[in-house]
């Protein structure tokens, strides 16, 4: 065992293996997490759009095209300005 | 062998040992710290952070229309928005700066003080909201709030027949209080939705965190069983 540790080549190989494994684990974690976050974000934005689109018939006819543009460009802002009573969650 | 050299080597070994010991103690403390917060206090801290960061809001429904056979819509809801500065107000110089900067973006800004808020612009259009979109995200103290207005067909006797609505508490959603509005309130009213969103430390919505918990349901349109003239006669008899 001690002979292995004293061997410089072995030490280099060991460090390289640890580094490679760490990078692989890091990359794998980021990839899965990233994919999940992106799909969840896309789903949330799509829900915002759907919810805001239901307000379209209530808008004055002259404002509908601009509302549509607002919902497409910034669905979260459209939802925000259509919502009320933002409050803390109960403990 | 030089005795001084031995002493230096011994000193070096001792100092290295102390340094190593300090590093080990530091490592143990750091590990304990991580363990304490990530395992022992985990649930409590998660609960606390959820409470601090997440907010729940209401999505008001749009009231349905009242339609008469052969006469089209007698009553319908129009959604408008107002740009306001709610309480607590920032210091006066800050308000002046906000108004000056907004006036450069939105011509015709006439601030008007109301009880709980400063009305900066009534009936702000979606086009104008798009213009101030970036300004709004930089100034979370400003709010664009929805307002629902019930419009009634301009025909003699229709206003009395349709009746009146009033805004519900803490919501722009409308409730029928007289006439047909009251009679068909359960169909016309719709159901409010509920959503959850995460806020950052400045009070801005964190992008991509909106979750619709309950989808809002707009009110249904009500088609009256007989033409307006008949209903007006009936109403006139009753009045």
Image (cartoon, coloured by chain):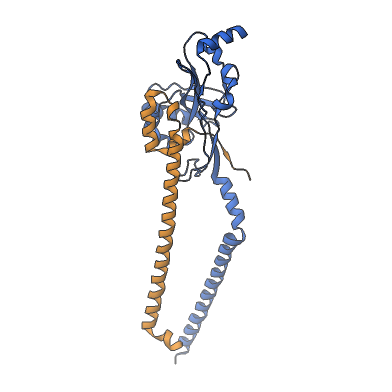
Question: In front: B154, or B48?
Answer: B154
- Res. B92 in view: no
- Res. A57 in view: yes
Point out the residue furthest to the right here: A91
Residue A45 placement, left or right of B44 = left
Q: Position of residue B222 (x, y in %)?
A: 52, 23
Check the image and report above or below for B216 versus A44. above
Q: Residue sitting at 57 percent across and 23 percent down? A: B115
Point out the residue furthest to the bottom here: B1
- Figure quadrant of the C terminus of chain B: top right
Question: In front: B221, or B27?
Answer: B221
Q: Position of residue B25 (x, y in %)?
A: 56, 71
Q: Position of residue A91 (x, y in %)?
A: 63, 46
Q: Residue sitting at 54 percent across and 46 percent down? A: B53
Q: Residue sitting at 37 percent across and 75 percent down? A: A16
| Among the 4 quarters of the image, the one containing residue B42 | bottom right
Residue A18 placement, left or right of B171 = left
Chain letter, colour blue: B
Q: Position of residue B89 (x, y in %)?
A: 53, 30
- Figure quadrant of the N terminus of chain B: bottom left
Q: How many marks?
A: 0
Question: In front: B97, or B103?
Answer: B103
Chain letter, colour orange: A
């Amino acid at each position: 065992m001690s002979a292995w540790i004293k061997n410089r080549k072995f030490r280099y190989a060991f460090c390289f293996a640890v580094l490679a494994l760490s990078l692989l684990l890091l990359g794998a974690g980021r990839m899965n997490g990233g994919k999940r976050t992106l799909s969840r974000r896309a789903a949330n934005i799509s829900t915002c759009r759907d919810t805001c689109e239901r307000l379209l018939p209530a808008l004055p006819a002259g404002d509908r095209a601009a509302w549509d543009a607002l919902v497409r460009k910034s669905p979260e802002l459209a939802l925000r300005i259509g919502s009320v009573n933002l409050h803390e969650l109960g403990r | 062998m030089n005795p001084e050299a031995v002493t230096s080597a011994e000193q070096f070994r001792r100092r290295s040992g102390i340094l190593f010991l300090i590093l080990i103690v530091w490592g143990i403390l750091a590990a304990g710290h991580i363990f304490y917060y990530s395992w022992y206090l985990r649930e409590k801290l998660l609960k606390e952070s959820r409470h601090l960061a997440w907010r729940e809001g209401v999505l008001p429904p749009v009231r349905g229309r009242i339609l008469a056979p052969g006469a089209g819509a007698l009553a319908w809801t129009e959604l408008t928005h107002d740009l306001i500065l709610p309480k607590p107000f920032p210091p006066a110089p800050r308000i002046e700066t906000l108004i000056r900067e907004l006036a450069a973006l939105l011509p015709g800004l006439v601030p008007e003080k109301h009880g709980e808020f400063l009305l900066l612009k009534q009936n702000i259009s979606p086009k104008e909201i798009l213009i101030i979109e970036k300004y709004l995200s930089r100034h979370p103290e400003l709010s664009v709030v929805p307002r629902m207005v019930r419009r009634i067909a301009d025909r003699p006797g229709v206003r009395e027949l349709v009746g009146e609505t009033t805004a519900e508490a803490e919501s722009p959603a409308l409730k029928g209080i007289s006439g047909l509005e009251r009679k068909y309130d359960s169909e016309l009213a719709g159901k409010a939705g509920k959503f959850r969103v995460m806020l950052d430390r400045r009070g801005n919505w964190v992008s991509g965190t909106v979750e619709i918990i309950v989808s809002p349901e707009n009110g249904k349109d009500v088609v009256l069983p007989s033409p307006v003239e008949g209903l007006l006669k009936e109403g006139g008899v009753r009045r």
